[in-house]
Image (cartoon, rainbow, N blue to C red):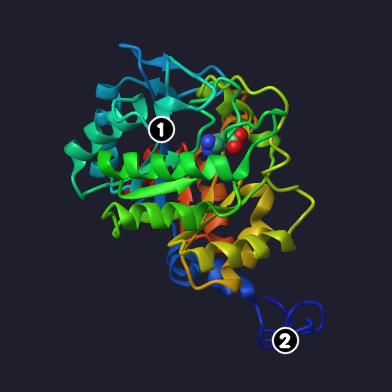
Amino acid sequence: MTAGAGALPTGGRTVLGPHRRPRRLRGTPAFRRMVAETRLAPEDLVLPAFVHEGDSPRDISSMPGVQQHTVEGLVELALHCRDAGVAGIMLFGVPDHKDAEGSGATDPDGILNRATRAVRDAVGDDLLVMTDLCLDEFTDHGHCGVLDADGRVDNDASLERYAEMAVAQARAGAHVVGPSGMMDGQVVVIREALDDAGFTDVVVMAYTAKYASAFYGPFREAVASSLSGDRRTYQQDPANARESLVELALDEAEGADLVMVKPALAYLDVVASLRAATDLPVVAYQVSGEYSMIEAAAANGWIDRRAAVLEALLSIRRAGADVVLTYHALEAAGWLREQR
Ligand code: PBG
């Protein structure tokens, strides 16, 4: 034992004094559980999922374990999410036909709207059905909006398409629409369109701070995007943090119900600053590249997959996110139930 009652061998001195030993509260799992500041539960998680028009599922090679589902497969996946206690499923459509206007986005029989209807019919109100509200999956040029005569993304013309798209998604049964195009004014235009069509209860989950990120790489394969060029005229510069507070003020004033930061892990400072600046729930999207990095390292035996997945999700919660969108949602929910 050390000299003196409770004294450390350093002569009883730490910065905090002789009696402070933070390790006491780390000594057993029971102590660690009791003092955990952050908890992760299935109901904090939302699963993003892809649906295509083919009649068999298609693997996404850059996202091992993730597929483009058939409508039937997607319904089954949604039921698994419901049973696992996951909060919701965020749907992305991969249409066969793409054109300049992204007409499949507003077609009630377009793949995303068709799939939304099927999922909502199956899950009712037991799982939140969320839809990506953006044109990039549906346009042949791959941009998130429509283009003007000079080939630039036309903000206000895109808003008209978003308004139509929001109503089509609400009609299909979406509980939550997630505008991800980063057009100025998108939240208020969508809110008004929903209200005018009688969908006052449909929730707008705004992509408030969405950065022009290299971590979306695998997603482009997932939705067969044909984007040439980049999205830097509408998505935020990774150099900027304060700009997210400007976006937050606008989205709050425009009527957003939920505000999102995307990507997650490289932007935890932004998650924390939004958490401090708003009383709305904050959502963070752990994007495709974040998923694939963990999968690739784990496949090489370089990291413990399960531990790394749960640590990343917990850290996103610790930074201030109430809800996390993650491609690991279903599997993580299973692990979290096991741990209880
Ligand atoms: C746009 C959208 C993107 C993602 C979600 N919504 C792609 C982009 O902005 O380039 C990326 C999600 C991911 O990488 O997991 N509809």
Q: Where is residue 272 in the image (x, y as percent from the top left)?
A: 62, 64
User: Looking at the picture, does residue 192 appear above or below residue 124?
Assistant: below
For the N terminus, the image quarter is: bottom right
Badge 2 vs badge 1, beta-carbon distance below 8 Å? no
- Rendering quadrant holding ligand 1: top right
Name the disc covering residue 49, or none. Answer: 1
Image mark count: 2
Determine whether, in the image, residue 98 is placed left or right of residue 177: right
* Quarter-of-image position of residue 294: top right
Q: Mark 2 points at which residue?
A: 18
Marked residue nearer the N-terminal end (2 or 1): 2
Marks 2/1: CA–CA distance = 54 Å
Identity, as a three-letter code, of the amino acid under mark 2: Pro
Residue 340 numbered tag: none
Q: How many C-alpha atoms fall within 10 Å of the one at disc 2: few (<14), some, or many (≥20)?
A: some
Q: In which quarter of the image is residue 233?
A: top right
**Residue lying furthest top in this view?**
55
Q: Position of residue 247 (x, y in %)?
A: 63, 60
